[in-house]
Image: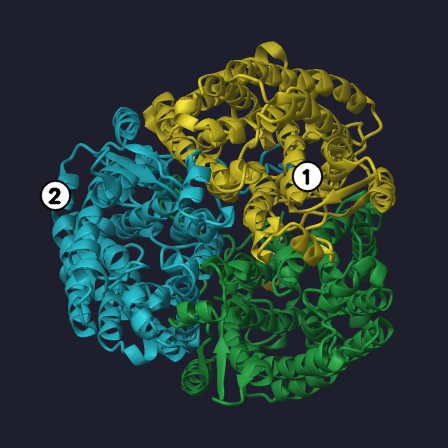
Chain colours: A cyan, B yellow, C green
Amino acid sequence: MLSWFYGGTKSTNVRVSLPAVCFVWQIAMIVLFGVFIRYNEEADTHWQEFRRENNISSDIENDFYFRYPSFQDVHVMIFVGFGFLMTFLKRYSFGAVGFNFLVAAFGIQWALLMQGWFHTLDPATGKILIGVENLINADFCVAGCLIAYGALLGKVSPVQLLVLTLFGVTLFAVEEYIILDLLHARDAGGSMVIHAFGGYYGLAISWVLYRPNLNLSKRLNGSVYHSDVFAMIGTLFLWMFWPSFNSAITDHGDGQHRAAINTYLALASSVLTAVGISSVTQKKGKLDMVHIQNATLAGGVAMGTAAEFMITPYGSLIVGFCCGIISTFGYVFVTPLLEKYLKLQDTCGVHNLHAVPGMLGGFIGAIVAASATEEVYSREGLINTFDFEGDFADRTVGTQGGFQAAACCVAIAFGIVGGGCVGLVLKIPIWGDPADDNCYDDEAYWEVPEDDESIPPILEYNNHMIHKLPDLSESNFQVEQI
Amino acid sequence: MLSWFYGGTKSTNVRVSLPAVCFVWQIAMIVLFGVFIRYNEEADTHWQEFRRENNISSDIENDFYFRYPSFQDVHVMIFVGFGFLMTFLKRYSFGAVGFNFLVAAFGIQWALLMQGWFHTLDPATGKILIGVENLINADFCVAGCLIAYGALLGKVSPVQLLVLTLFGVTLFAVEEYIILDLLHARDAGGSMVIHAFGGYYGLAISWVLYRPNLNLSKRLNGSVYHSDVFAMIGTLFLWMFWPSFNSAITDHGDGQHRAAINTYLALASSVLTAVGISSVTQKKGKLDMVHIQNATLAGGVAMGTAAEFMITPYGSLIVGFCCGIISTFGYVFVTPLLEKYLKLQDTCGVHNLHAVPGMLGGFIGAIVAASATEEVYSREGLINTFDFEGDFADRTVGTQGGFQAAACCVAIAFGIVGGGCVGLVLKIPIWGDPADDNCYDDEAYWEVPEDDESIPPILEYNNHMIHKLPDLSESNFQVEQI
Amino acid sequence: MLSWFYGGTKSTNVRVSLPAVCFVWQIAMIVLFGVFIRYNEEADTHWQEFRRENNISSDIENDFYFRYPSFQDVHVMIFVGFGFLMTFLKRYSFGAVGFNFLVAAFGIQWALLMQGWFHTLDPATGKILIGVENLINADFCVAGCLIAYGALLGKVSPVQLLVLTLFGVTLFAVEEYIILDLLHARDAGGSMVIHAFGGYYGLAISWVLYRPNLNLSKRLNGSVYHSDVFAMIGTLFLWMFWPSFNSAITDHGDGQHRAAINTYLALASSVLTAVGISSVTQKKGKLDMVHIQNATLAGGVAMGTAAEFMITPYGSLIVGFCCGIISTFGYVFVTPLLEKYLKLQDTCGVHNLHAVPGMLGGFIGAIVAASATEEVYSREGLINTFDFEGDFADRTVGTQGGFQAAACCVAIAFGIVGGGCVGLVLKIPIWGDPADDNCYDDEAYWEVPEDDESIPPILEYNNHMIHKLPDLSESNFQVEQI
């Protein structure tokens, strides 16, 4: 309701652009789905025939039952996890959870197409056949864009976010194709393809969109008590379901089992070191909610590549241990420096939670892969885990480690270069982004309820019963100084 | 605390009626369960014998493992989804989530009995044998009543809600029996039996209970910032788990797989059109939280019948596309008209989210069924999908489409007529409902904490340090005008 | 921000002790995991060989697929359920959800070791082999400590909580070994080993740490409107997922199926009686949120032992019926008496939700076990359900009932005696606990955002536009008496 005052010169009116983008893109999705997307054999009514032809003994061996519980956990992470994690700002909770919802809902459709074209297009029919694993991958793909949103939270319009997502998903699909198919790297939980890419993508965009006068919105760049509690909903659902995230598309059987265990352990370890560093770096040892909300998750990010390998339980604890420390230090020391010297404004600190732990996760994966032995994995286990089949049947673990490391560099490069280019697109002054003194404010894009928290009480006011207290927080009620 | 003032002439004291209903009905449940309900063969200790007799090769083929993950998702939708979706009112969050909890907890017990009598009563033993699928169906059944609660939110007492549930579950079971068994219609996700029925049931009750002076409670009929964020918890859990809802009781294998994919796509599509219409219908293009909280779900409602059919992925997107538009328009234009001209007060807009999309879902299902072909489904797939077996072995898809459409009319008729009758019962002035100026207020039925949000601070008060500020929001503290 | 004023003489500065404990213990975990913990054969890359050797026909028979969905539900209960249930205090939500997170993250690691040494240490290799069932058991183990935290909420430092957890998990593992292995009692959902133990453990510690002047913090020992809504998130996730809790480690097939059904029913029944008693014991029949948040869960606690038995559906309803009553009465009458006469300060009323229902659940289990018959269970079912194999092949159900009852006494004794001893350790004045006038206050251990809820509005103040209202809730602003 104060936007007329704060609003500055920029218009945040998206009444034409937002509906236009939503409708045109959604119609495009329908057309493209009509041309390209069909059910795969496990979701099609021909499944019973397929079962008989392939000697599948029971319906329970439909991939649905292997992956659907994990899929739903991932789905919760994308929509509630990422959405609520970003509600910590005092007046941007609608934007956090609402735009996260919008972006993800568009992104998963576009991801099904982009990933389908690169990975599962049937050359004979020209169709993409989808099943539950594709849904998981679409959720994964969109996670990269939601991470990027974290760096831009409160500073961009929903139209910009949709543009960011259109390009982000496209870049993701290309990068993923290079990493998983051409380099034949393993990255089941996406340390590289999701977190490193998404983190650097968002940081690069944020760097291009640098706002020198952002401190005009400083009053809103912080939390209130209950917004921090809301953010903990996001943190906890991310934390709890991260084992499902890292195991959702790993191999059936031991692959999923091991990935879940490793991630569970790394996350537990991160919590203790995040708390320890948070306490030791604050005066009087008080904990900072920002660290608890974010750095506790670093272990999950960093295990995205190695979770399916035989990293050992204590190896997982060590990864979580180190990343909890690094991430918390990032929030305390690095983010302020990045803003001061690199002109990089990173609202949610995705540098510390996604970019760096993701990059580390990629290199940890490379090291663990390079040090794999037939003794530990068994010959068959080695082949299954690293997929040393077909063209890659002769690859050694050392070579694999090298390709893993190269893959990590590819992800980072795609994030930085792609983000730089997309940032330039988003800088065009047509997208309805807020003015520097109007950031972090739901007023810009939402009908916000007028009256915060108060029920108009009955009061005596100059001995008259009135129905509404002259509103102390808003009105021109005067206080006498004494 | 202000109820003495606002309370008018009606008493909301339910100290006798509420405990009486709770205890008498719960005891009745125990007696009826004692007479009728037993474990089915998959939950009974005789399972190992049953396995051997039926050549079931593994414990994993117990229906528990096919359906339990979906059951838990549905359970979350019923208790957290519906409960929190209704917390948007500034001072009715306790009632929203608490009465939802109470009603659902009673309803699932009564539903196990009612649905059991109609569907799974063993004529030989006179027992109802229950397993996980019955639990899902009970949750579904209660969803109808919770939808009806949405139309009445803030205007009824918990005793009325329990009466509404008693009759609602009963009507549901009869209607479901007619639709699924007699008409042999398919409705796995309940567009017709749950949403159309529940929506019109609630609207009819609300129409009978019309309150001409409801604007006396207008001050409380709206949201505050954080209540809107709470409501998003409900929205997102409903949205995320709707694929589980529509696939929970479909056929093992491809049936569950396909229903989940279709619902996932329709929901994604709804989000974009809901956002688009919300923006274009508001001044300055600002989004309205009411639309984001509700209309984004319309695609899930409308896919309740067709999700298990071969509607195709792009067909699902089209359904979501249209229903997102229709639902949002409903909130913007239809609800105000209904209140003005039809005297229909619909607190949560169930007309736009459940009644209309449910009805549309029923007819979409009819069309998709009627246009099914052996070419697309395969002969076996057609039989499995539409259950063309036994008495219905000769039914054509055209006939099936006709019966589907008839089923939708049955659901609506049951909702309207049943709701009208139950509304008359609820109009009897013995149920402790609030007065017109006391609606939407938790004070009526809850011990609400006195002191909102403020920690009593230390203040100087006439130069004395005091521990508690004279409470500005409640007392007759006087403010001097200057 | 008022801690300088309220702070009294005790220092809550944990800047040395908290990081020290976090780091030293986490490093110890890494070392111990390195020595002892490995993947079991279902999570190891040798799984494919193991499958062939054991004629396991499909990957879907990996225990992961039997238990992982239940594991994730349990995980949500531990972190979101217990965490948010305790957010009801107006200014201790950070501590509730944050310390719960910290304690659980440490506890699960220590529990994997302790439970591994007692239950799954391979004597040949000296290794503990872990899989998904161990993760569930670790979550269970930590639940005992989180229950104990409920009795101490707001009155202890995070360092004390970590000490409580270190000893609590140790005691738990010993007690569990005695109950499950030596006495060969069944307790799949932990009425005895988790709830009775955890409840009495917390109560005994609270009794030792009695604070005669706790009423100095009375102003903060209560809820506000939105903190009660947050707490309902915890309640509902506990309530919804309790069927998974009680069935997570029961036998494959009918065991899990039956345990889920029984728990579902008992919980539903609890809700109605909790609501009934809450209403009848309050003036004007208004419901008390404390009862709805807690007593509705009593049925789940009390079914922890008997859920896997053939207690029958109506038996489950009866258990829930009684425990809902007993628990609510506990909150209304017993807790105040305990505080007054026994000097027992129990913040969350764990006496009424965990200690007593857990104890009752143990004895209910004993009765149900003792009354088991071959007619109802079948010979094979009896053996499977009570594990009458090996050394226990000749045990009768009567004997089993006796051992179940003895097990319950063991759990309570461990809780009381262990809690007394740990309480003495925690009384040593080195742990940074808050002073009596500084309890229930996040200020003690958290950086709390300064400005609650208000966006600095634009105001006229003596006819000048100002940016910030003199903050009524914090400053020494003076009010003139008239």
Say which of marks 1 and 2 sits in front: 1
Q: Is residue B115 above or below residue B321?
A: below
Q: Name which quarter of the figure residue C161 lies in.
A: bottom right
Residue C151: image location, x then y, percent? 67, 70
Judge left or right: residue B316 versus residue C342.
left
Q: Is residue C469 visible?
A: no
From the viewer's side, name the closer residue of C478 and B186: B186
Q: Quadrant of the N terminus of chain B?
A: top right
Q: Which residue is mark 2?
A: A424
| Kind of residue at disc 1 | Ala
- Label 1 and label 2: CA atoms lie apart by 54 Å
Q: Which element carries disc 1, helix, strand or loop?
A: helix
Residue beneath label 1, please? Answer: B138
Residue B65 rendering spot, x and y as whole percentages: 57, 52
Which chain is mark 1 on? B
In depth, the one of C368 and A229 nearer the eye is C368
Q: Position of residue C81 (x, y in %)?
A: 58, 59
Packing grade of label 1 (10 A; few <14, some 14-19, many >=20) is many
Give the residue drawn at x 22%, y 40%.
Answer: A117
A21 left or right of B30? left
Q: Where on the picture, by quarter, is residue A242?
A: bottom left
Q: Is residue B110 visible?
A: yes
Q: Nearer the viewer, residue A157 or A3?
A: A157
Q: Are marks 1 and 2 in contact (CB under 8 Å)?
A: no
Residue A375: give x, y in percent of width and height.
Answer: 31, 81
**Marks 1 and 2 on same chain:** no
Secondary element under disc 2, as helix, strand or loop, is helix
